[in-house]
């Protein structure tokens, strides 16, 4: 929801009953950039203020339900400065990142070639697509108990679950990307004497690149979401583990800090992948999935 | 590369190819199931780790009539469905008006956008520990997680649908004497309806996924709870029955939504966006 011009034209105001009309028109107009920022910052400050006021000592909301903002800041300092649950905060974050990147890359290594093959050779699609249609409705989280029974409570189980979560978007988007390429391009390349291999690498994969990157972004988002759930169930380190432990020991500040860090990292992944798309496929400004 | 790939564009495929695709697909699934049965029977991996498909089917039948962890398979499914519908209904009831308001009244955007964007990136499951502290292991907790998972899809798609309405239409309505509310109700919302409905569909599917996660962590009933109990009891067949039930219910309801969409909103759903 970036600042954007509304489609509504400003209604002319200088007629009879001008005041109410101007008031109505103002509601149908996008505020200017400066006003937008001012309102946004004001809204954030108001929410922070309301939070601080409601959770003040003797306020309406007890600290065990929602701690005041000051407590959360103090918890953040405490988490960063001293080890929590056996390792430093940085180590917990790294442990989460390790698993998510590992599982995501592994899924990409399998899913990207598979998806491209499924988009390109219809026999590959006939064989593999029904399998994915059957497996796709099962949420990745539902694999967690199976992963624990098969692989135990450790990193392999988490990597497996992240792999399953990331595989489907990798495959489906790659297939879609290759499948929906304009046949004219392929025929033109063939007319110009390109071999099959050249058509696949130089025409198809390049045209499909924006959608491939979009698939990678969705896969990473899914992987992150699933990892947090996996860490709530089977982990001895990581951000989800911190969150679960903090809720058991009623350390509300630490719980909120871990949630915020999870959200910030998720946003960073999303924006990072969008930046990557602009670097790799700068012609695809509009093509966001 | 050697096996002469069909380079004709996929769109130019002849119609007769569809049955062949069906046959190959069915054969591929059948092969997988048979291979699973053979591997499981061959005893390379212990049955505790990989039961045969037949075992899973038998367990399915058993769970449908016997109680396991408090209720039968249907009971668990019903518990899950109840929470799902409550959470998703709340998300729809709050999210669609909010999305429409954000698109129709631009000054609201800077008020809502900062908090919305901040909270949107926290995955629904990250709310589970705090939701448990707030509401205990109750239906409210589960419904809250469903709500959190479903809400952004409703808001984003309603917002998108309304802001993609051709500006000519509200202006034409205004010229013909329609007031703001009438324009919104009679002109803008019907045009935006397909996108809004897609948002509802995504909301239900996101909510289902999140619910499974929530039930794995807390609760005493539900399909997610069933598979976590299967894990504790070291019963892979129970886990697999639960997974199949979850997948089948999710697919069934999504299919139902697609049918309803085609029946109620025959015009095309355009530009709808999946909330991350």
Image: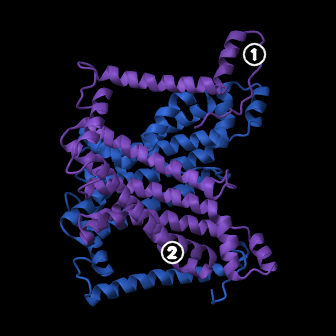
Chain colours: A purple, B blue
- The residue positioned 54% from the left and 47% from the top of the image is B199
* Kind of element beneath mark 2: helix
Q: Position of residue A128 (x, y in %)?
A: 51, 77
Instruction: Name the subunit of mark 2.
Output: A
| Quarter of the view holding residue A57 | top left
- The residue positioned 29% from the left and 46% from the top of the image is A89
Q: Position of residue A127 (x, y in %)?
A: 53, 80
Seen as rendered, the residue at the extreme front is: A81
Q: Which residue is mark 1?
A: A13
Question: Is B44 on the left or on the right of B204, as rendered?
Answer: left
| Quarter of the view holding residue A253 | top left
- C-alpha gap between disc 2 and disc 1: 60 Å
Q: Are marks 2 and 1 in contact (CB under 8 Å)?
A: no
* Kind of element beneath mark 1: loop
Q: Is residue B62 visible?
A: no
Residue B106, compared with residue B44, is above or below; it is: above
Q: Position of residue B49 (x, y in %)?
A: 25, 76
Q: Which residue is mark 2?
A: A130
Q: Nearer the viewer, residue A277 or A252?
A: A277
């Amino acid at each position: 929801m970036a600042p954007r011009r509304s489609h509504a034209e400003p209604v002319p105001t200088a007629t009879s009953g001008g005041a109410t009309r101007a008031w109505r028109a103002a509601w149908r107009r996008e505020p200017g950039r400066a006003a937008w920022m001012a309102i946004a910052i004001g809204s954030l400050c108001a929410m922070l203020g309301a939070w601080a006021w409601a959770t003040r000592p003797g306020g309406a909301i007890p600290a065990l339900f929602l701690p005041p903002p000051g407590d959360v800041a103090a918890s953040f300092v405490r988490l960063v400065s001293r080890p929590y649950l056996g390792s430093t905060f940085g180590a917990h974050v790294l442990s989460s990142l390790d698993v998510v990147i590992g599982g995501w890359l592994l899924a990409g290594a399998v899913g990207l070639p598979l998806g491209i093959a499924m988009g390109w050779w219809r026999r590959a699609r006939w064989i593999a697509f029904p399998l994915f249609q059957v497996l796709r409705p099962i949420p990745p989280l539902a694999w967690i108990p199976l992963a624990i029974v098969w692989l135990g409570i450790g990193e392999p189980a988490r990597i497996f679950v992240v792999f399953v979560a990331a595989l489907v978007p990798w495959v489906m988007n790659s297939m879609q990307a290759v499948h929906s390429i304009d046949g004219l391009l392929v025929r033109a390349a063939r007319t110009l004497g390109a071999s099959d291999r050249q058509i696949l690498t130089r025409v198809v994969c390049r045209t499909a690149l924006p959608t491939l990157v979009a698939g990678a972004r969705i896969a990473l988002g899914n992987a992150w979401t699933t990892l947090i759930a996996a860490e709530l169930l089977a982990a001895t380190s990581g951000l989800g583990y911190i969150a679960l432990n903090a809720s058991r020991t009623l350390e509300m500040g630490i719980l909120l800090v871990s949630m915020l860090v999870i959200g910030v990292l998720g946003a960073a992944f999303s924006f990072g992948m969008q930046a990557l798309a602009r670097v790799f496929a700068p012609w695809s400004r509009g093509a966001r999935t | 590369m050697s096996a002469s790939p069909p380079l004709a564009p996929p769109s130019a495929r002849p119609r007769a190819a569809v049955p062949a695709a069906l046959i190959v697909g069915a054969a591929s699934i059948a092969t997988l199931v048979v291979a699973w049965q053979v591997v499981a029977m061959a005893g390379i991996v212990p049955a505790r780790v990989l039961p045969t498909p037949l075992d899973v089917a038998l367990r399915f039948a058993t769970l449908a009539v016997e109680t396991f962890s408090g209720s039968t398979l249907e009971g668990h499914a019903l518990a899950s469905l109840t929470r799902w519908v409550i959470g998703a209904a709340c998300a729809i009831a709050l999210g669609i008006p909010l999305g429409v308001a954000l698109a129709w009244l631009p000054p609201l955007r800077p008020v809502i956008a900062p908090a919305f964007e901040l909270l949107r990136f926290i995955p629904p499951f990250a709310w589970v520990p705090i939701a448990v502290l707030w509401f205990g292991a109750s239906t409210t907790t589960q419904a809250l997680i469903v709500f959190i998972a479903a809400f952004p899809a409703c808001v984003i798609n309603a917002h998108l649908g309304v802001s993609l309405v051709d500006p000519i239409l509200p202006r034409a309505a205004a010229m013909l004497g329609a007031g703001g509310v009438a324009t919104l109700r009679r002109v803008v919302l019907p045009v935006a309806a397909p996108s809004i409905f897609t948002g509802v569909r995504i909301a239900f599917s996101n909510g289902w996924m999140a619910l499974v996660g929530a039930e794995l962590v807390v609760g005493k009933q539900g399909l997610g709870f069933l598979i976590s109990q299967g894990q504790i009891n070291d019963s892979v067949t129970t886990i697999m029955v639960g997974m199949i039930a979850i997948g089948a219910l999710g697919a069934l309801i999504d299919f139902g939504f697609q049918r309803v969409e085609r029946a109620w909103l025959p015009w095309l759903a355009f530009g709808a966006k999946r909330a991350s």
